[in-house]
Amino acid sequence: MSPRRSYDQYCSAARALDLVGDRWTLLIVRELLAGPRRYTDLHADLPGVSTDVLASRLKDMERDGLTTRRRLPPPGAAFVYELTGRGRELLPVIQALGAWGAAELGERRPTDAVRAHWFALPLLRALEGEGLVEVGLEEGEFHLRLGAQEGPVYGDGPAPVEADARLVMDAATCEAVAREQLSLTDAVRGGRVTVTGESTLTKTLREN
């Protein structure tokens, strides 16, 4: 395990960057906000990271108290990584960074990888209230846990139980909402987002 590098500055921002300033660390946090993940799943959803760098970052994050590693019970019997409470506190940091970086997205480049669940956290910023929301895009599906105080805030794939609301939209609409060029309310009103379900959350999304 590599020794932790430090800016050696008595500043909270510098201390924070001592822990999460290395390349890939915050993107690993982004993935683990979906809940426990196996190493192979993390590697698949972090295109461009080498196996050595990913392993090193995970060890550093475990040492620094941001993640833990545990073995799943049989028949899984695989190791998974998950955020600690301290690691989960990075959610608003990731949210703020995503909001700040929205202006930098521009047009999708030919070399840009994309995963449907990468839109989860930007959409989470656009939704209020509590409940389970399932989202369908051309690239795939993911679900959001609005108002979750602990545990995963989103997940890849369909919701594990019946969702309170389901949103269906095309990639262009989702990108516009993620880049804050279009509000979710206006997208629903304009017919660019289809909302289904019978919950209070669904009615709120339709009537706002």
Image (cartoon, grey):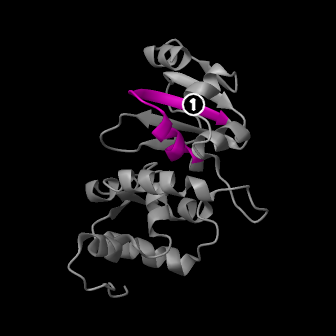
Q: Which residues are magenta?
A: 119-136
Which residue is most to the left? 10
Residue sitting at x 46%, y 29%: 132
What crowding class fits label 1: few (fewer than 14 Cα within 10 Å), some (14-19), or many (20 or more)? many
| Relative vertical location of residue 168 with respect to residue 62 in this rendering, above or below | above
- Residue 116, position as x, y percentages in the image: 64, 46
Choose top left, top right, bottom left or bottom right for residue 152: top left
Left or right of 137? Residue 27 is: left
- Residue 58, position as x, y percentages in the image: 42, 71
Camera-nearest residue between 51 and 169: 169
Residue sitting at x 32%, y 84%: 4
Residue 77 appears in view = no
| Relative vertical location of residue 165 with respect to residue 145 in this rendering, above or below | above
Residue sitting at x 31%, y 43%: 150
Choose top left, top right, bottom left or bottom right for residue 134: top right
> In the structure shown, which secondary structural element does the residue marked by tag 1 occupy?
helix
- Can residue 148 be found in the magenta stretch? no
Disc 1 marks which residue? 184
Left or right of 107? Residue 70 is: left
- Can residue 134 be found in the magenta stretch? yes
Residue 58 appears in view = yes
Amino acid type for the residue under numbered disc 1? Leu
